[in-house]
Amino acid sequence: MHLLKCTRKSFSTEELRRQSEHKRYQPIWEMVNKPGDVMGKRDNEYQLSGQIEHDEVFFTTEIPQEQKNQPLKRGRGSHYKSKVPVIAESTFIENPKQGSKPKRVSPIKMNVINDLKSNAITYIVKEQIDKSAELNTDDSTSYSILK
């Protein structure tokens, strides 16, 4: 676990097995992947409340070889990008240190979705946040149903 925490870049499971001089790959693989599984299950057990900020980010996606020569859409609906709505609970800090931001953002929930249409966004928001929460978003048309 120390090797996983102290490196900035990802650490291959095979390299971890080799450095720890372990003979079997399976226990090392489980040790590396278990924390992510547990954190994913934990996220489903609570809803965000209070002051909520919502926006989307785009992560580069690998394209299958047969689609590489086809013309693909660019911009917000690009095939090169995975669409990930980000929902964060923010709290104002009473006396922030000079030069630091007046808000603290934690926890954060993110899910990969197929489209950024209003129905998909509304479903995720209703599932992830408390009904009494105050939601802050940009002026995207995908958020028009949310109040």
Image: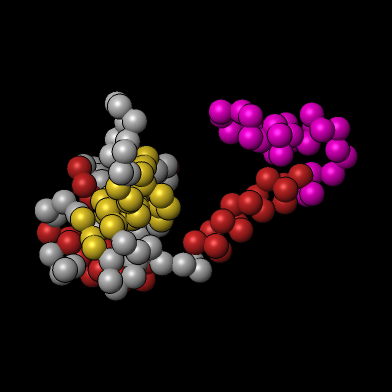
Residue 128 appears in view: yes
Examine the structure image and report whether residue 114 is included in the region drawn in magenta. no
Q: Is residue 38 above or below residue 5?
A: below
Residue toward you, 32 or 132: 132
Is 25 part of what is drawn in magenta?
Answer: yes
Question: Residue 83's spot in the image, x, y percent?
Answer: 32, 51
Image height check: is 135 above or below 8? below
Residue 129 falls in image quadrant: bottom left
* In the image, farthest residue toward the front: 95
| Residue sitting nearer the eye, 58 or 71 | 58
- From this viewpoint, is residue 12 visible? no
Asked whether 112 or 62 is in front, the reply is 112
> Where residue 23 sits in the image (x, y, percent)?
88, 39
Q: Which range is magenta? A: 1-27
Task: Look at the image and tell me in which quarter the C terminus lies.
Answer: bottom left
Report x, y in % for residue 126.
31, 71
Check the image and tell me how it is coloured.
secondary structure
How many numbered marks are there? 0
Vertical placement of residue 1 versus 108, above or below: above
Residue at coordinates 56% horizontally, 29% vertically from top-left? 9
> Residue at image x 42%, y 46%?
64
x, y percentage for residue 84?
34, 52
Q: What residue sits 12% from the left and 59% below the top?
A: 141
Q: Is residue 116 left or right of residue 20?
A: left
Image side of residue 50 versus residue 37, left or right: left
On the picture, is 41 further left or further right than 131? right
Q: Residue at x 42, y 42 (%)?
A: 62
